[in-house]
Image (tube, rainbow, N blue to C red):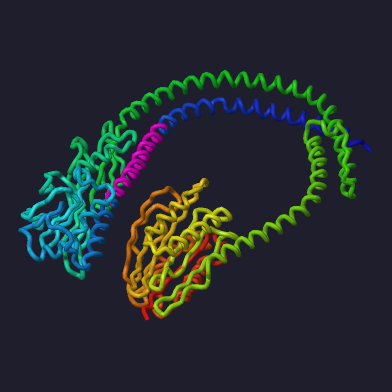
Amino acid sequence: MKSISVKVRKTLMTSLIIVIALFTVIAVSFIYIQKKVYVDLNDESSTELEKFTDDVIYENIRQYSRDITAACGSIIENNYERNSSKGDSVADYIISIYGNAPDESQSLNTNGIGFIGGVTEEKTEEFYKIGSVRDYIKTVPGYDCNNLDTLDIFVVTESGIVLDGTDGYLGDDYGDLRDDDWYVLGKEAMEPVWTDVIVGSVTGQEKIDYVVPLIYEDEFKGVVVVSAPLIEIYNTLLNINFEGVKDVVLTDSKGERIIGGDDYDIFAIQNSREVIFNGDYCLTKYNVKAADSSVYFIFDVSEVLSAIEDIQGEIGNMSLKMSSFSMQFIMMAVILFICIAVVAALIAAWYSKRTAGHIVNPILELCHQVEAFGKGDMDIEISKDVLETGDEVGLLAEKFVGMSHDLKDYLGKITKYTAEQERFKTEMEAAANIQLSLMSQDFPKSKEYSVFAFMKAAKSVGGDLYAVFKVDDDNLLVSVADVAGKGIPASLFSVRTKVYIQVYGEMGLKPSEILERVNDSLCQNNDENVFVTVFLGILNIRTGRFSYANAGHNKPVVIGENTHWLKSVNSLPLGCMEGIKYKDEYIMLNENDSVYMYSDGVTEAIGEDNSFYGDDRLIEKLSHVNKDMGSEDIISLILDDLKAHHNGVEQSDDITMLLVKYTNK
């Protein structure tokens, strides 16, 4: 019987000689056959490359232009939306105070007020109701009463009152702005509208106005106007720092050019997806949805087009050089292949003999060791010659020795690891029980209200918390908070927050004052820069007045005849920096009205299709709540809907809910 060494040597020798011979014959034949094909292909490739280069560069220009247009358009839309949100905010504020009692402490001779046709008793009474809007306008972001060239916000009532946030007195005989086109447009539309370009009757500037009608109890009361100067919009577009943008042209809703260069054929483009080349520039279009207008962007491409011609010339020259070089390479390759074949055959004979011994002997020794290991002998001893073969066999032997040592260590460690895991699990369960014990389930009870809260951490312990306690006989404090993060660090921070809310809440302070003191306390020794969002409200159980302040938390939902989001000024979370001021707000709850508070673990709960539970689904579910349902029943309803949404998917974030219902019995 022949040894495995002889068999390996003969097999290697035969295989190498056959492979070398076949490779040489095929390679030489293929080179000669492909010689003409290669030359023709080179010429064809040169032509195709020139065309491809042309197409790719033009397409890159088109795509770049589309991308920049989309980016600039997004900035334009955001600017329009910011201005419209400012007008909506002022209008909402005015409507919210129309029903208030007149505040006769306001002076008719203060700044920022004008009267069309003089002062009358009717105008005076209306002014006492809405005069505070002047101070509100000054708080609108971006508004500067000393510089109306960038942003102007003012109110004109149907009765003839003009209000803004400036420091100048407007007078008792103000021009009748109710005849201006923008006023008539807002009155007829009875909904927010953007005007085309108009000339301001006071400033004389060209501008675009956002007009919001004031509708109180189905009656038109006037308009809120946010004026954006046209030149400011144009300069904003030109100052967007995107390379290649040469100019910008704006048109109104009728397609008329309102600002920008008139040297460009902007009407050649039909829709916003087209890119039109015209000489040394290209043109794109963006339709501004908010204002029903269009913006045209002009890109300078003269340098790119010149570079295309230079590239195509270089491609032609390179093609000629490649053809000449290819012929020389083919001849050298044929000679080289023949020489390599002869040398390879000689080397194969010597190497096959040497390789057989190196391969077989280490394998045999390794087989004996594996057999012993399989029988339970883990004290492996492999010779140095096998470990230092420098190939896969040596690597296998080295790994085999390491595996035997690791297995012995593993068997010792696995017992210790199992015990540590059991201890860690016990400690986490204890931490969770401590945290839950701080969130009291013994909620105050009264015939005037009912309250219930629920919390479930994503991990054993979490960063959510809630607080419910009576400040005094007439006031009930409720609060929901969400610490940034999860686990033990977030849990410890939530405990601090709960303690501070309890301490300062029992002092009888306003919601804003409680948040300010808690914030300053949390900022002390907050080296990890942890922060927490908090919503805190105080219900007067005698009157139904619900005072509240918000520190970066989700807006609650008011459940009643008209279920809606509770409007609030959303400030920075607690723990970010000391000295932050928060704003008090309030609403009056009717009988059986409820305020539903929650953490973002509710609306951002992930279902089996990776979709969020979402704000729309939450408010839709709460809109159909039966008015006779108690606080616990409503929270159970949402929990059941969340469970259906999860459909077996693991909870990804802490879930906390708190609901207070004003029964007024």
The percent coordinates of residue 18 (x first, y second) are 76, 31
Residue 214 inside the magenta-drawn segment:
no
In the rendered view, does 563 fall on the left or right side of 369? left
Name the residue located 25 percent from the left edge and 36 percent from the top edge. 247
The answer to whether residue 7 shows anywhere in this view is no
Residue 71 inside the magenta-drawn segment:
yes
Q: Overall secondary structure of the magenta stretch?
A: helix
Name the residue located 38 percent from the left edge and 69 percent from the top edge. 539
Q: Nearer the viewer, residue 548 or 645?
A: 548
- Furthest toward the right, the residue is 1
- Asked which quadrant contains residue 33, the reply is top right
The percent coordinates of residue 553 (x first, y second) are 42, 58
The percent coordinates of residue 498 (x first, y second) are 49, 60
Which stretch did the figure color magenta?
53-80
In the rendered view, does 487 fall on the left or right side of 134? right
Q: Nearer the viewer, residue 232 or 251?
A: 232
In the rendered view, does 504 fall on the left or right side of 382? left
The answer to whether residue 220 shows anywhere in this view is yes
Task: Count every numbered label the image shows and give the total.
Answer: 0
Q: Nearer the viewer, residue 311 or 91?
A: 91
Look at the picture and state if 474 lies above or below 604. below
